[in-house]
Amino acid sequence: MARFTTLSAAVAELIRDGDVVALEGFTHLIPFAAGHEIIRQGRRDLTLVRMTPDIIYDQLIGMGCARKMIFSWAGNPGAGSLHRFRDAVEHAVPHLLEIEEHSHAGMAARYQAGASGLPFGILRGYAGTDLATITPTIGWITCPFTGENLAAVPALRPDVGVICAQQADRDGNVMLWGITGVQKEAVLSSKHSIVLVEEIVDSFSPRTNGVVLPAWVVDAIAVVPSGPYPSYAQDYSERASSFYTYWEPISRDRGAFLEWMDQHVLATTNHAGFLESLDRELVVETHG
């Protein structure tokens, strides 16, 4: 049953070294604040799961938090590569990162299977690609009704799923809207879940493409305004597009990366402090 707490307390209680952790969000509602708190608390040997790992996973990998990553596309949107990710894979810096690569559809099928309590998901995918030759968690199954050969992928069941949402009500129900990606499935497939919200409301108003997660599927709710920064929360903030190009040269150099993380993440105690540490022109624009 959902309980209201601080982000630091939620991470301390629910995320352990060696856990499988999914920080999900697609384009918006990416839980950057949670990733930074994981870094501050020095978690290690995590298996990080995400359909589209971007800057926050680059930071987690570069700070030595990850042992493995399960993912589909990875990159700095609109700016280039994830250089800390590449350094870990290509040069074992700060240590070698194990990778398990899937397609977007494959990852979605894995989350859906986990959320549905099924052992695996199936899809018409991977045919004509070489992913199955390098990823052992891609198999093939024959449909018992049509004889069609289909790809099969094992269910994802993270230890902890972490998402951002716009609102929670006072009973612990959560509502998100806009581009919802696989946030719902990430929560439903995980053993435990942490949700960062912009605000607590008395009741929800109907929203286009709105998703409501009932209190009984959520463990912890933390109010973290602008928690997705530099991503955004629809109707609450705008994407800090300048941050993504700003990050590119920092991430290329390990020394510059470590200095930046020390100044803006490790030297701050929470997400509000992180935002205050940034240059004015990079701070997220909020509404309301």
Image: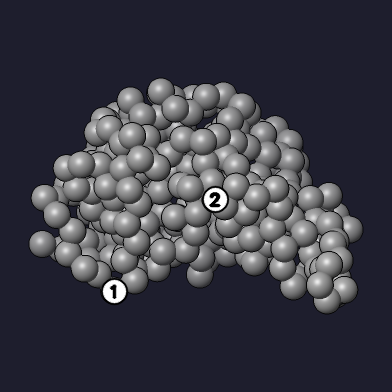
Foreground label between 2 and 1: 2
The quadrant where residue 103 appears: bottom right
Residue 244 pos. (x, y %): 44, 60
Q: Give the residue displayed 31% in from the left and 43% down from the top.
A: 215
Foreground of the two, 217 or 42: 217
Q: Give the residue displayed 70% in from the left and 48% down from the top.
A: 119
**Label of residue 286 in the image:** none
Q: Give the residue displayed 14% in from the left and 50% down from the top.
A: 201
Q: Is residue 244 above or below residue 173?
A: below
Amino acid type at circle 2 is: Ala
Which residue position is annotated with label 2?
115
Q: Can I make out residue 15 in this image?
A: yes
Which residue position is annotated with label 1?
208
Amino acid type at circle 1 is: Thr
Instruction: Check disc 2 and report its element: helix, strand or loop.
Output: helix
Instruction: Check disc 1 and report its element: helix, strand or loop.
Output: loop
Q: Is residue 116 above or below residue 94?
A: below
- Left or right for 248, reference 156: left
Residue 163 pos. (x, y %): 40, 48
Q: Is residue 97 above or below residue 129?
A: above
Foreground of the two, 129 or 255: 129
